[in-house]
Amino acid sequence: MTPILFVYAKGGPPLEYAVPRIAAHAEVHVLALAPLPRATEAAWLPGCASVTTAAPGEGVELVDLICSHARRVGAAAVLTLSEYAVVAVAHACLRLGLRGAGERVAGARDKRLMRRIWRDAGVPVPGFAEVHGPEDIATAFETLRPPLLLKAAWSAGSTAHLTVWNEQQAEEAWKTGRSVMEASSAQGYAELHAADEGVSDFLLEEIVTGQASDWFEGTGWGDYVSVEGIVADGRYHPLCITGRMPTVAPFTERASLAPAALPKALQRRIEEVSRAAVDALGLDTCATHTEIKLGADGAMWLIETAARFGGVMTTRQVETVFGFDMIGMLVRQLLGRDVSYPERMATEGVGAAGSLVVLAVDPGGRPWTELPAWDFGAVDWPSLVAPGSRVEQVREHSLAPGSPVPPYEEAGGANSMAALCFLTAESGPELLADCGRIVAALPKALTAASADPPAAGPASPDTTATSADRSTPGSTA
């Protein structure tokens, strides 16, 4: 088979799901820039022709490393599924003459540049101002309407996002945000190509008001969606929409759900806005994950586009519900093979699937009063979901049994995650209801499990608790 270099870094779908889908189309050679998930090794290692670990370095040094290894294994394509390695891999592909995200990849990574491109192209974005230091904060408050959201320009998973109402709060938030980004960087959850910029670059933007009830059929939905897609040789192919539960303050994702309960006509409107956003970025060949805020009376604002697939289990959700093996499609495209794309984005699927992040906050966003130990196998999952639903723990993105659930910290975003669960249900409304019951019941269920001795006998295959080697929380949404 044709060799492909898979550059592994933190974030992205778990290797036990991703590697078999890459290996179905190419000979997989892994260049690991972060510790590999050994707890799931039996599932992903057989799909690899070679595995090499290396210190990532940064900038030109990192690109040199990727290029050198690609030449060594004779790679016909280079792929990453991590937000943090997207820019470095794109630059390596340009140097090697291979298909990749292209020379404008930074526009799909640096939130400041992204918003400048969209503003100039007439794509709807909230008002914003770049923050390089405290002096920029005063200028931002002269031109923008508070409250404002402070964002790290190179973050992922809502890390270093803080809401501020005045200049003094913004200055303190900027200091906090820098500390959070430094801590994330130490754990491997930071931009690899420009490490210094990843820690220090921020922006302030106006908080636009969403109105989920104007868009969704039924209640309980969050006020934004994502359009999942692929850009193939400069042509954008939107594939489907994934929905959300309401975020935890300030804007941390709790659950990603497919399909989204949106009328077809509204899905088509979202599709066209995502097309305008992605086309403006000028990407070449890559995955895309485009987030859009939904307001009253049909208003929309772009949140961001990433030149990679949605994080954690988005690719599996899409394959389960819509039948698109997006990883396999992108691998074939990078290798120059034929790929069958739909003429229009899919608006209907079969069944429902979702990713639920375990955070120590109740349905109203209030912190848990107790922080019990995490133990997936001790929870009576069938009692929390509909009869036709199933719950699995995603081992690569979950703490080991017995680990204390970390407290939720607004600035930390997804870094406060204790575990990730993958759910399937017979319908979207059932899936949404399942997630709501789990969020409400988990603190009590885990506290009771911590107080009781372990139950005897094996658990069912859908609810078996397995240990993970994930020592610190974090994900890429």
Image (spheres, helix red, strand yellow):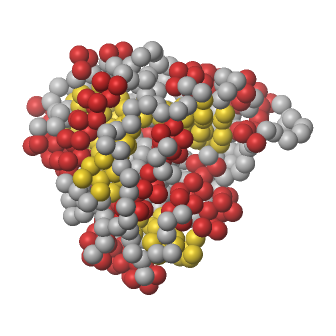
Residue visible at 42% across and 62% down in the picture? 331
Quadrant of image for the C terminus: top left
Residue 163 image position (x, y, % from top left) = 32, 31
Q: Nearer the viewer, residue 30 or 326?
A: 326
Residue visible at 10% across and 31% down in the picture? 142
Q: Is residue 223 above or below residue 205?
A: above
The quadrant in which residue 210 appears is top left
Residue visible at 85% across and 41% down in the picture? 458
Q: Nearer the viewer, residue 303 or 22?
A: 22
Q: Is residue 329 left or right of residue 300?
A: right
Residue 229 image position (x, y, % from top left) = 35, 46
Residue 202 image position (x, y, % from top left) = 26, 46
Residue visible at 35% across and 44% down in the picture? 342
Residue 21 image position (x, y, % from top left) = 53, 58
Q: Is residue 168 visible?
A: no
Q: Is residue 324 visible?
A: yes
Q: So how many labels did they put on this image?
A: 0
Q: Residue furthest right?
A: 456
Q: Is residue 336 left or right of residue 139?
A: right
Q: Is residue 262 above or below residue 50?
A: above
